[in-house]
Amino acid sequence: MDKAALEEGTQFAPRFDASGLIVCVTVEAATREILMVAYMNQLALDKTIETGVAHYWSRSRNALWRKGDTSGQVQRVVSLSVDCDQDALMLTVEAGGDGKACHTGRKSCFYRQVTTDGGPRRLIFTE
């Protein structure tokens, strides 16, 4: 697909990387807070679109992962967007269960910030 068609056209043509994956940023519909970043392969993307429930590809387990199967935090898809060159996705979801998306038990996987405070780089907790 040429650049103009990819960036300005109406054809959905996700660009998976050499490993067959595409990055997916997941955002909570009500707050627009980033909950997590994960990857999808074609199967995970197809299942997400077909079922309306977020599916991802677990790189560590090398397996399809339906969010919420073990945690109860099923993510119901409100919308699926693609970035300008179609190599990243954004899922807007309603988070089920207790709404905690992170495996650490936090709402978001982004619960620390990098700071230097004039010294060495370190992490501070924000949640």
Image (spheres, grey):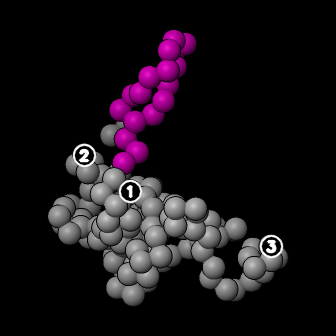
Which callout, 3 or 2, points to the residue nearer the camera?
A: 3
Residue wearing tag 1: 59
> Which residue appears at 33% of the width and 69% of the height?
64
Closer mark to the observer between disc 2 and disc 1:
1
Which of the numbered marks, if any, corresponds to residue 104?
2
Picture quadrant of residue 112: top left
Q: Is residue 78 visible?
A: no
Span of residues in magenta: 109-125
Q: Position of residue 22 (x, y in %)?
A: 53, 64
The secondary structure type at the circle numbered 3 is helix
Q: Quadrant of residue 61?
A: bottom left
* In the rendered image, the vertical position of residue 108 relative to residue 66, given as above or below: above
Task: State the CA–CA distance, disc 3 to disc 2.
Answer: 40 Å
Kind of element beneath mark 1:
loop
Report whether 2 appears left or right of 26.
right
Name the amino acid, label 2: Thr
Is-magenta flag for residue 110?
A: yes
Q: Amino acid at mark 3?
A: Lys
Q: Going from the N terminus, do you reach mark 3 or mark 1 first? A: 3
- Residue at (36, 48) in percent of width and height: 109
- Does the magenta-highlighted stretch encompass residue 118? yes
The numbered mark, 3 or 2, whose residue comes first in the sequence reads 3
Circle 3 residue: 3
In front: 52, or 19?
A: 19
Q: Residue at x 39, y 87 (%)?
A: 50
Residue pictured at 60% horizontal, 74% vertical: 14
